Image (cartoon, coloured by chain):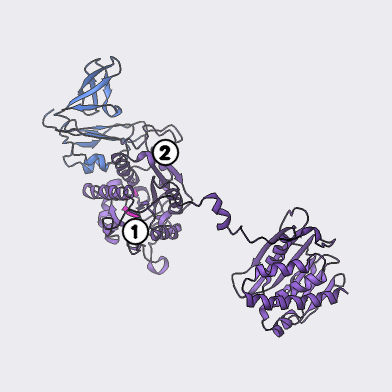
Chain colours: A purple, B blue
Amino acid sequence: MSVKILGKSDSFYDVYERRPGTNKKQTHYCPGCGHGILHKLIGEALNDYQVAEKTVFVSPVGCSVFAYYYFNAGNFQAAHGRAPAVATGIKRSLPESIVISYQGDGDLAAIGGNEILHAANRGEALTVFFVNNAIYGMTGGQMAPTTLIGQKTTTTPYGRTVANEGFPIKMAEIIASLESPVYVERVMLADTRSINAARKAVRKGIKNQIEKKGFSFIEVLSTCPTGWKMTAPQAEEWIKSTLVKNFPLGVYKDIAEQVEPLNLAKNLASLERVPRFLGLVQDRLELDTSKMKLGEEIDQEIKIAGFGGQGVLSLGVWLSEIGMREDLKVSWIPSYGPEMRGGTANCHVKLSRSNIGSPLVTQPTILIAMNRPSLEKFEDDVIEGGAIIWDNSLIDVAPKRSDIRNIPIPSTQIAKELGNTKISNVVVLGVLAGFTDFLDPDVVQRVLPIIFKKKHLLEINLKAFQKGLELGRDLKN
Amino acid sequence: MTNARGFVAINVEECKGCKLCVTACPVDVLHLAESFNTHGYSPAEYEGDGCTGCGVCYYACPEPGAVTVYKNWAEAQVAYICQNKKVISSLSLVDPIKGIAKCEACGEQVILSNISNLSFAE
């Protein structure tokens, strides 16, 4: 007759050296906590499948944050709720490893609700253990997304109400409704029979990953005797009498048999291909920089402000692009509201011969104001002797300052006459090139085809630039 | 020993006295001790007889190393590497309640649940 010892699995450390304090033989969990039972089931499975060596746990924020004290396996501690994202990264870079995301209900269903949905939807080849005890255990028994209607917690002292806190979230059902997951089951740790069923689910979840089947999600209804203010046996009874009625057990999805194993080979770009991915490889513009005429006043700090949609940010990008072609140091940072059109937008552009310390432009040498609020807001910031270029076809007030160069340009009106109000920013670019010394019109005209790749756009933009250039040269003289 | 087919050893210092094994045991051979361990818990204790080796208490227990169940203990010859005499010895139970056995080679008493290198011959 075969003899078997059911004892501490080799997946656990003999002595929990990582645990601070003197008690290195016991876990930190409260007496009767379901975490310990699930730990044992996982540890046993890892041992039986002989995969503990290549297993990486991603432990959450919650009571099981200290899982790395106990498991003799790899461990990552993720930010609150982010375990599925971290696990995704680990699994993709180490496809042969067994990656287990072990999360509680506060972690997975509340702050990490988004993370788990998308990891599941992508069908990452992970095994996720979701410990649902209907409460925030570690922080002292607050309401979790899974707290039952009427259940009293420290944050729902009169019981959870639908009107105030909504219904408990059923994660297994939600995950099972997605296409990608291969295995979704809800089990409980409440008595011999249910623990045995949980043991089977745990093993299946891990086996699925060993067989590269895809995303497995096991929701485990577990006890929190401390948070529920019960003894451990009472807590198990409460799972059976109450919790399980709200969270029905069962296999919600199992297509592991039908799906083919995933091809988890690393698909990493070779280093040579990275610059192209990042858009760093561009058609080089051959310029004879020795002939370039650069003005004395080369350290320009430009602020461009207006409505979103006026090309305020684009103008800044072009100036930086042109500056780079002229071998200047450049910086550009945008600042805008959430609207794509409408709202206000501005950007900070620096062009310099020397290194740029900060990209922020607090005292512009040139302010380009495309609407009235921008002119009024930034007028006072312009340095003495600086210039304000403003669109007098849109702005009905003039700058009040006399110590600056006042350049009104009806750029929107000009753009409209040329056939498209969207090119008013190109008119301004022309004015800048004509009026100042730091932009070489030749360079700008050779950069414009790089910016406007479509031919019909290029034509009208070149026209707008020429118009602005003439205006700028007139102003200079 | 009467008709016990298995044997259960409780590691007193790892047990937290949550009583889950006591309520789970189908043959009621576990109870909480009157005494305390060093952490202040009353640990589970084996009656000393009647364990069937079913393993229910092992899975009910949340503590990874607190419960060790030896299935088919009665039929098996327990082999044990005696650290003192450096020979393969066998163990005989001295105190089944506390899980203490005696090494047949050197006569020293050992706590069963602390031994990881037990093997069984049939």
Q: Is residue A396 visible?
A: yes
The numbered mark at residue A69 is 2
Residue A435: x, y in percent? 82, 71
Residue A220: x, y in percent? 32, 52
> Which chain does the numbered disc 2 sit on?
A
Give the residue type at disc 2.
Tyr
Question: In the image, is A110 to the left or to the right of A440?
Answer: left
Q: Main secondary structure of the magenta part?
A: strand
Question: In the image, is A441 to the left or to the right of B50?
Answer: right
> Which chain does the numbered disc 1 sit on?
A
Task: Residue at 78%, 56% (x, y): give it.
Answer: A353
Vertically, is A9 above or below A323? above
Is the N terminus of chain A in the top left, top right, bottom left or bottom right quadrant? top left
Is the C terminus of chain A in the top left, top right, bottom left or bottom right quadrant? bottom right
Task: Residue at 27%, 22% (x, y): give it.
Answer: B110
Question: In the image, is A232 to the left or to the right of A338?
Answer: left
Q: Nearer the viewer, residue A424 or A143?
A: A424
Q: Earlier in the sequence, mark 2 or mark 1?
A: 2
Q: Nearer the viewer, residue A145 or B39?
A: A145
Q: Is residue A155 visible?
A: no
Task: Residue at 62%, 60% (x, y): give it.
Answer: A282
Task: Tell me the magenta residue range.
Answer: A215-224
